[in-house]
Image: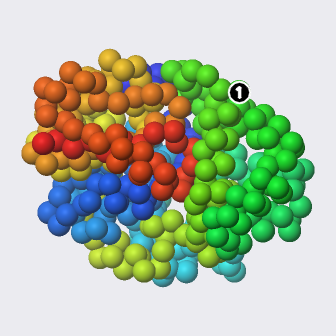
Amino acid sequence: MKTDIENRANFDIIRYAQVWEDADLLLEALNIKEGDVVLSIASAGDNAFSLLAQNPAKVYAVDISEAQIACCELRKTMYRQLSHKEHLVFGGVVCGDMDRVAMFQKLDLPQEVKEYWEHNIELIQKGFMTQGKFERYFKLFREKVLPFIHTRQRIDELTAPKNEEERRTFYNNVWNNLRWKMMFRVFFSRFVMGRLGRDKEFFKFVEGSVADRILSRAKHALTELDTSQNPYLHYIIKGEYRTAFPYSLREENYVHIRNNLDKIVFRKQSIEQFTAEFDGKINAFNLSDIFEYMTQNSMDTLYETMLQKASADARFAYWNMLAPRKCSDSLCKKYGVETDEQQNKQYLLKDKAFFYSKFYLDKVK
């Protein structure tokens, strides 16, 4: 039986070839311990692999999309067989000289995964980690919109090392011009983003201006956070990683992920189905922003199912992009779930992936 969002949106395509949620924030909040069993939304795999680097007992990464699972399984094989540099160049997220198709033929992939990519070999040729719908949306912004707003020199200056006062001065006096505000509001509007970036059905429960809220968060990221160390910003405006990398792509984390690959399992199924069928206890949950796609009542139903499988010290991490969703007061009281609103605000202030308006860490006590 399909979930509601499966009936409303198309999951046959690669929506995300990379994960656009801050893994550093996720790892700090969930505080994975050796022996933990973790349930994660798979998406493109980045954050599931980041969790793996913390040496848990098991990571179950689930997704309803065959395309997303294919991305994850390919990345798993890349970690196992490729060097760190080869991984980055093969994926297309750094420049380098490589025959990607020839390299693909050398990878020892599960048969179904190999067949999927053979049918989509053009994505391999282009560097598949740049070819999700969301990544192509950023490419359109980077190549068609941003040059109309700022020169290449100014764009490079945005990510140059600066202290907080210098970042604010640069943003207010140089970056935040009329064209930036106008073009940002158009390109990141509900209409454009729903058709070119995400899916219009992902905004079904969103009220108010999408662009204004993202613009406010972008201002925070460009002034309060170190732009020279923000990998998500670097990729959006440069189309590759150079000096700043997300957690799963940093060289110092590569061997830890590789050593734990046997502990990760990818499943093509809904989180509702996985949780209902799982026989055991789960210590940590990385839930991405899945609650945005459902009503509050549907969230409560799913959350209660997960709470029934949660350990006594379980931690739940999830984002809101635009639709407000959190564990209901009645459910929190029934299962002893606590959330520290002030701590959650502090987490959000650190969030380098600046699309989200809320971050929640819920703890079972």
Colour logic: rainbow
Whether residue 286 can be seen here: yes
Q: At 34% across and 60% down in the image, what residue appears?
A: 28
Could you say where residue 195 lies in the image, as x and y percent from the top left? 68, 31
Q: Nearer the viewer, residue 47 or 214?
A: 214
Q: Which of 207 and 125 is in front in this view?
A: 207
Q: Which of 329 and 103 is in front in this view?
A: 329
Q: At 61% across and 54% down in the image, what residue appears?
A: 221
- Number of marks present in the image shown: 1
In screen coordinates, is 36 left or right of 89? Answer: left
Q: Is residue 274 above or below residue 266?
A: above
Badge 1 element = helix
Could you say where residue 36 lies in the image, as x and y percent from the top left? 17, 58
Q: Quadrant of the C terminus?
A: top left
Q: In which quarter of the image is the N terminus?
A: top left
Could you say where residue 205 lies in the image, as x and y percent from the top left? 51, 21
In screen coordinates, is 170 left or right of 365? Answer: right
Q: Is residue 281 above or below residue 322?
A: below
In screen coordinates, is 11 left or right of 156? Answer: left
Q: At 40% across and 75% down in the image, what residue appears?
A: 253
Could you say where residue 301 lies in the image, as x and y percent from the top left? 26, 23
Q: Nearer the viewer, residue 246 or 112?
A: 246
Pointer 1: what residue?
Answer: 191
Q: In this view, does 297 lie above or below 106?
A: above
Whether residue 18 can be seen here: no
Q: Residues within 10 Å of mark 1 (few under 14, many from 20)?
A: some
